[in-house]
Amino acid sequence: MTTLDETDRRILARLQLRCDEPLDDLGQHIGLSRNAVWRRIKALEERGILKDRVALVNPAAVGLGLMVFIQVRAAHHSADWLDQFRRAVRAIPEILGVYRMTGDLDYLIRARVSDMADYDRLYQRLIEMVEMGDVSASFVMEELKEGQALPL
């Protein structure tokens, strides 16, 4: 774990909320000059603490209003199957996250689709690309909290 001083934490907390804030404004909020803030941001990037700066898109506004969690049990527990599975999930843009799990479930996939028919197309593509042991899906009815900002 990398240690962060209070100033780095304040910069990261602010960037997580608004990464496009002008350096002058960020510096004023943090209490540093524009150049000092820029140097700290560059150092955070070089240390691998600050990964990306992105814009978050409203999924419903672009026709991807249905979130689905897909539970997968592997067909085989082999390096070849895992490599094929990795390639398959990385090739499908609707798949936003894939997590290897403990317990009864092997993998949990988080995806965004427009509707049930779109989910079925995703499912068909996935099972064409890799053999699955068992697949089930749960659809999100309401998002109570969705966020990316880490508690710093």
Image: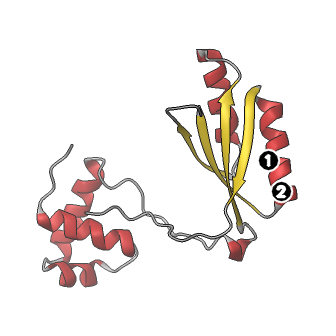
Q: Is mark 1 on a helix, strand or loop?
A: helix
The N terminus appears in which quarter of the rendering? Answer: top left
Q: What residue type is labelled 1?
A: Leu
Mark 1 residue crowding within 10 angstroms, few (<14) / some (14–19) / many (20+): some
Q: What residue type is labelled 2?
A: Asp
Mark 1–mark 2 contact, CB under 8 Å?
yes
Residue at figure coordinates x 61%, y 17% from the top left: 77
Q: Name the residue under label 1.
A: 122
Percent x, y of residue 97:
57, 48
Percent x, y of residue 133:
73, 26
Vertical comparison of 125 with 7: above or below:
above
Percent x, y of residue 115:
81, 63
Residue at figure coordinates x 21%, y 70% from the top left: 10
The C terminus appears in which quarter of the rendering? Answer: bottom left
Vertical comparison of 25 with 84: above or below:
below
Percent x, y of residue 140:
67, 62
Residue at figure coordinates x 28%, y 77% from the top left: 23
Instruction: Answer left or right for 4 relative to 11.
Output: left
Q: State the mark number for residue 118.
A: 2
Front one among 56 and 53: 56
Instruction: Answer left or right for 35 relative to 118.
Output: left
